[in-house]
Image: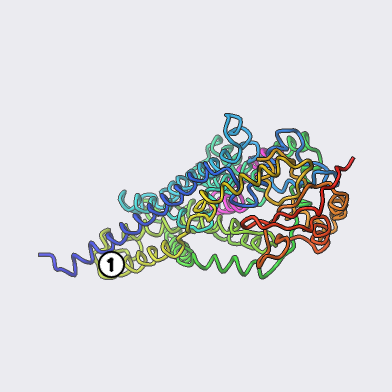
Amino acid sequence: MTSAPARSARWLPWSLLGVAIAALAWRAGSDLDQAIAALGFPYGLDYGEGVVLNQARLLSEGRAFGDITQYPFIVFNYTPVYHLVLNAVAACPFDALAAGRAISIAATLAIAALMALLVRDGLGQSVDGRSRALGMLIGAGCVFAVQPVALWIPLARVDMLALAFGFAGLWTACRMDGRRGMILLAGLCFTLSVFTKQTEIAAPAAAMAGLLLVRAGEAVRLAAACFLFGTIGLALCFAFWGTAFFEHAFVYNVNRYDWQVLGEHLGNLLRHAAFIVFACLAIAHGRTLVGERPTDGAATGRPRRTLLILGVYLLFSGLTLGFAGKVAATLNYLIEFLCCCAVLTGILFGWLAGGRITQGTNQGGTKGDAAVAVILSLLLIFQIAATHTPPHELLAQRAMVRPMLDDLVAEIRMADRPVLARDFVLLLRAGKEPGWEPAMFVELAEAGLWDEGLIIGRIDRGDFAFALFDAAPRGGGTGDSISAAMRAAIARAFPIRERRGWLMLERPAEPAGATP
């Protein structure tokens, strides 16, 4: 008869893993429910949504990558693939904002599926089918337990699509096996990733470096494929927009560096400490498997190649965390590194369920296996709970917020001149041309690449009907990151201030005539 301790050693780890998978399923459902709710909310949830929507509009009108010394003062801070995809989806027809958010949702689901496939390839035949399936579920589910991902799924921004292309390239690179079509497909995916967001270089670099360690010829051919598609992409961009494309995407895309900003984002990264620990454990254990030369080939071929590429990817994506120190950086710079950690977490738990960590039985029948399984499973459950993301404030209060925003749109639409505002979604809903993007042009002015007098002169001449910016704490003036000169110009032109929720509407003292 089996003793009670033996039965506990067998069933407790699997029970805890079941709880973890259920918690991940709940997180996925919660995140997707919020994202679907965002499809029906017609206003911006994030400053960057309006910026991207306006860029897509200018692209469709043939006004992309324009002269930044001419009104409207707009910088294209991303390469154009997302904008092209958004315009294609919106032409179906869909509302542009909803189309952009739907792209992010679809891209996130694709990332989860690709992560599961990478877990499967990393595990190979080293574990049984049940353990492999468990690892795939955990790897795919962990993407929804990454807090920045949960925040970014509902947004019409470029990040999730760029990452989806990057993971598609990684998975294809792990399965190339010398096939020319797969090499070309991997190169195309990596090129699309970079042409969606120009900083997405960790994935192609990791694939080439990892392949160089095991199949140098394939690494060279992959690099050639990326060079081919990249050259075609650059040629098309220069054909349509000339040198302005390069200036906008690279020269003008500048930000000051702030170590305090980096520290704040790294503090958020530490909320995902368990995922980072799991990734490191997977790499440490994977080194022993990669170094083995068993006769059954379990650690060679595709699994070995996948583990090498993921290990290099963890390193390279970790290096890109340095981008999080830019003044305007947000949590999106943590997403790629944490998604790599999630893949490795799935692989680790696949090994754990298959008895590969302590070389025990598949059921965790030894006390050592059971103890490791219980500890790691509890750590995973605590990690899922620690990164719980509450619903977006605007979505949670949309019944109260929407009437206020509807009224603001009506006021903006009735204005006889352009309106100076940070929220481009409000301007676009009202049919007004966004004329100036504060976040980018403050940085350009600081770098000496743009004359702030161009916008100040227009404010002083009365070119704008009124201003609408985030209200500062305790009811102060304009709460956005703009210069003292801009604040003074807005105060001179719009001395009457009226609080509208979290926004401050600033009006002139008396109606000013339109500029001829």
In terms of secondary structure, where does tag 1 sit?
helix
- Residue situated in front as seen by the camera: 291 or 120: 120
Left-right relation of 15 to 426 = left
Q: Residue at x 56, y 55 (%)?
A: 336
Q: Residue at x 61, y 52 (%)?
A: 46
Q: Residue at x 75, y 36 (%)?
A: 235
Q: Amino acid at mark 1?
A: Ala
Could you tell me which quadrant the N terminus lies in?
A: bottom left
Q: Give the mark count.
A: 1
**Overall secondary structure of the magenta section:** helix
Residue labelled with disc 1: 370
Q: Residue at x 58, y 33 (%)?
A: 89
Left-right relation of 486 to 257 = right
Q: Position of residue 349 (x, y in %)?
A: 37, 59
Q: Position of residue 243 (x, y in %)?
A: 81, 42
Magenta-colored stretch includes residue 323: no
- Residue situated in front as seen by the camera: 408 or 187: 408
Q: Is residue 391 above or below residue 64?
A: below
The answer to whether residue 301 of the structure is visible from this angle is no
| Magenta span | 202-231
The answer to whether residue 77 of the structure is visible from this angle is yes
Q: Is residue 476 above or below residue 105?
A: below
Q: Quadrant of residue 368?
A: bottom left
Q: Is residue 414 above or below residue 488?
A: above
Q: Position of residue 53 (x, y in %)?
A: 66, 42
Q: Position of residue 359 (x, y in %)?
A: 32, 63
